[in-house]
Image: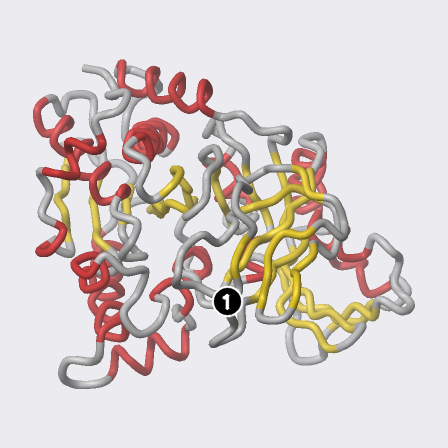
Amino acid sequence: MSVPESNGEALAATFDLSAVPRELGRVEAAEPGPTLICLGGLHGNEPAGVLAIDRVLKQIFRRSEGLRGRLIGLTGNITALAAGRRFVRHDLNRIWRPGRVEQLSALAGPLNDEDQELVELNASLSRILDEAPGRVYLLDLHTISGPGPAFAILDDTLQNREVALDFPVPLVLGLEEKLGGTLASYMTAQGVTVVGFEAGMHDDPTSVDRAASAIWIALDSCGVFEHETRSEVVEARDLLRRQSHCPARIVEVRYRHNVAEGESFEMVPGFASFDPIAAGQEVGTVRGGKVRAPRSGLMLMPLYQDQGNDGFFLVNEVRPAWLPVSAVVRRLGLERFLHLLPGVERDPNRRQTFIVDRRYALWFARQLFHLLGFRQEGKDGPRLTMTRRRDQLL
């Protein structure tokens, strides 16, 4: 059995997106092991993940030997999928804040659109976590509105990195610092190992193939399969390698262009993810003016759709050699000395949080905090709030 090259379009034609269940299916092996959750359609105009999950589940049902643990497929925004829209009222992948999740889950009766989707999806995820006898993994499948290769996104904890590095695609770090309320960050904070996978353009049939390949690789990486015992895993790696054309293996997000409510932002046509961009280059237009890149870097996820407020991102390369160095310094616990650096003070109320005043701190202070496993949580003028990520592998 092999990974199809380009039959995503035919599969989509036979799949009724107007009535997709929350749970697409599950395979449970007799032998205990890890749980892999595959989630598709968190945005309603991104059906490729749902189609890929359905495809892989059918293939495994036909031949389920060599499996241990569980594979569970879930749908994200059912209402928006039926409408073919990114969201109905608000972005389901921007509202996963602990306080809001707790508040909505406590309300009685049905809620409106994405609020109800959040409550139902959270209930499904919570049940899976409660039932899981071992480690839980989440593969969050997405597509984008512009061209470019497939890539992986992760909150840079050691456990997330351990799995993400197994995907033969570019890795994007630091996106969670620019976006609030993502499901990936919410689940990572609960101790789940999470990798986001952007499979390509929304309407490209090969995006389904790439998403299916990501599922096969995740099954292998998470230990649901014995190492590369199935031909689908080998062919999935080969497909992603062949289609992964990018000048950098690991990049970090340095800039996000926000599209304000009601702003008539339009991206200049022709940009693809990982295209080189020069500082000052025109990349878009707004009413009455041009939008220019504030810095040099590589383009990421240019906005070519009518919903969403992420106009584009700019990323810069991170040398792969820094990753093993950062793993070592995290395990050594060197963050306990950070308050000794100029311009750095410990937050008096939170042990794992530091305030960095960039007027006095070393010029590479932000990069140093990233190396030690911290993420930027807030910004007040020159002062940055840096909070420790939760590394389960220490």
The amino acid type found where label 1 is placed reads Gly
Few, some or many C-alpha atoms within 10 Å of disc 1 (few <14, some 14-19, many ≥20)?
A: some
Occupied quadrant, residue 111 = bottom left
Query: Which quarter of the figure is the N terminus placed in?
Result: top left
- The answer to whether residue 321 is left or right of residue 40 is right
Q: Residue at x 91, y 67 (%)?
A: 360
Residue 39, position in %: x, y? 28, 49
Q: Check the image and name the residue furthest to the bottom.
A: 108
Residue 3, position in %: x, y? 26, 20
Q: Which one is nearer the viewer's eye here, 314 or 138?
A: 314
Task: In the rendered view, tell whether residue 142 sits above or below residue 243.
Answer: below
At numbered mark 1, what does the secondary structure look like: helix, strand or loop? loop
Task: In the rendered view, tell whether residue 385 sits above or below residue 81.
Answer: below
User: Dot 1 corresponds to which residue?
Assistant: 180
Q: Residue at x 66, y 80 (%)?
A: 349
Q: Residue at x 39, y 30 (%)?
A: 221
